Amino acid sequence: MSPMRHLLIAALTGAALSLVSSPSRALERLVLRLPFLETSVTINLGDVQSTSELIRQSPDLADLQMAGDTRVFELIDKVFLTPLPVETKALLQGSTGQPLLEQALWAATQLVELEGTAPDPSGRMLTDALVAADEIGQPNVLGFLRSMPGEQASIDFSKVAVVANRLKTNLEQGVALVQATEAATVNSALREPLRGGWSREEQRLSVRHRPQPLRLLVLRPTGTDLGRLAVISHGLWDDPESFEGWAEFLAANGYTVLLPDHPGSDLSQQQSMLAGDTPPPGPEELRLRPLDVSALIDAVRNGRLLSGQSIDTNSVAMIGHSWGATTSLQIAGGRPTENKLRTRCVDRKDPERNISWVLQCSWLSGIEQAAAPDPRVKAVVAVSPPLRLLFDPSSSKSLSGKVLLVSGTRDWVVPSGPEAIRPMRDTGAVRTGHRLVLVKGADHFSLRSFRGEDRPALLGPVILAWLNEQLGVESSVLFSAGGWGDSQGQLVDVSSSL
């Protein structure tokens, strides 16, 4: 599907997301403002059954067709008859009223101007419209729109450019810093195939705060064992297997690594949600994820996990990606606060607004229970964490562990400007020993590393170097010694330039 089709489908859905139910009225007109064609197109939905009828009843579309301008016609012809995924109805039915869905709907409505309607953030009206579309035999975009209440919705595609420019601006600082700062040196030995051995097994652990046992991967070194424990936390709708490359690098260098599967926000939860069996992850997961990590450390300390190994549970390393990186900051003692969530989530024009705010703003109702420090965590690597709205800036001075924050210069989901550079600069975190590394050209997902990849994980050496230094491990691989860079993806420590 072309980017323009994606854009139009998103906008049409955005129009639907914005309307409130009114049984006596149905959506009559859809106005598309198309700056790239310097025109507006009014589509009269009416009682039509096909795109050809839609064109006959909409003079603007008919004029475009007669003028030989097929760009809009071909686009609309495909979009309006696109069948809606069968999972959509089940997803909405299972997600109605959930904070994450409400935030997603609120974000979608920013493209749409409505007449005489009010927002319906619950999603209930959407499900009703989908059911109605099925009943009239049009389970597609056209039937969905015809079943929506209201008189007219206007979609201004120039607003897409505004959003895109804002996201671009939120990346510019990171790009400039990387261009102006020398990349980390490369130690070729750290980029060779891994030599140390490790064992791998999957286990289940019963915990008090979850109804079902936690699934986790356990990687243990079969050579030199440092007696050090590292925990890796995955992001939203991800799983431990996406980070086994990091774990293999650490295990090959003497660390025992645990990778928990957070059941309320993992890949299987996403699949269940799309099937309509469970709602989206709720704000309670903000509290439960750190509890998962602390429960693992407790289990190692009391011998329920890793029995027979001598593990120092008073000096643990924590690594996380995306939401898992936010979890790592909570564990290290970052104090969640509602202040910015309440004031900034409602500002549609906030210059720092980015995609991760959909998730962050959904956490508000769980914020009072979200503090979950574990002083046993002494070293943290947080890769692409959503954090701008969540933490009290002053808490960076009292974290139990030193934090290495890593962000990609092309991360559109959690852009480096507002979510990494600005927090590090505003809090003065560098003065208290925390560091920021930017990865040139990396997006939100390219920093992950899977099991058995041909070359060592891109972030493997820098993660190892940081943990060794913060935990006092005697090694030539230390952050301050350098050599943790990569020739294919430049890693740049920009801390001194903030």
Image (cartoon, rainbow, N blue to C red):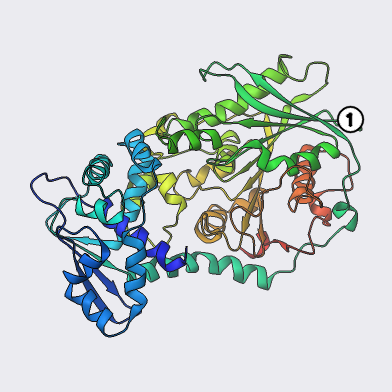
- The image quarter containing residue 259 is top right
Q: Position of residue 402 (x, y in %)?
A: 67, 43
Please say if 410 is above or below 444: below
Q: Which residue is mark 1?
A: 222
Which three-letter amino acid code belongs to the residue tagged 1?
A: Thr
Q: Of residues 338 and 13, which is closer to you in this image?
A: 13
Residue sitting at the far bottom: 67
Q: Position of residue 69 (x, y in %)?
A: 32, 82
Q: Determine the secondary structure under disc 1.
A: loop
Please say if 383 is above or below 418: above
Q: Mark 1, residues whose alpha carbon is within 10 Å: few (<14), some, or many (≥20)?
A: some
Q: Position of residue 468 (x, y in %)?
A: 80, 42
> Residue at 87% across / 57% down in the picture?
187
Q: In the drawing, does residue 271 fall left or right of residue 135?
A: right
Q: In the drawing, does residue 2 fall left or right of residue 27?
A: right
Look at the image and tell me whether residue 380 can be seen: no
Q: In the drawing, does residue 6 fall left or right of residue 408?
A: left
Figure quadrant of the C terminus = bottom right
Question: How many numbered dots are placed on residues in this image?
Answer: 1
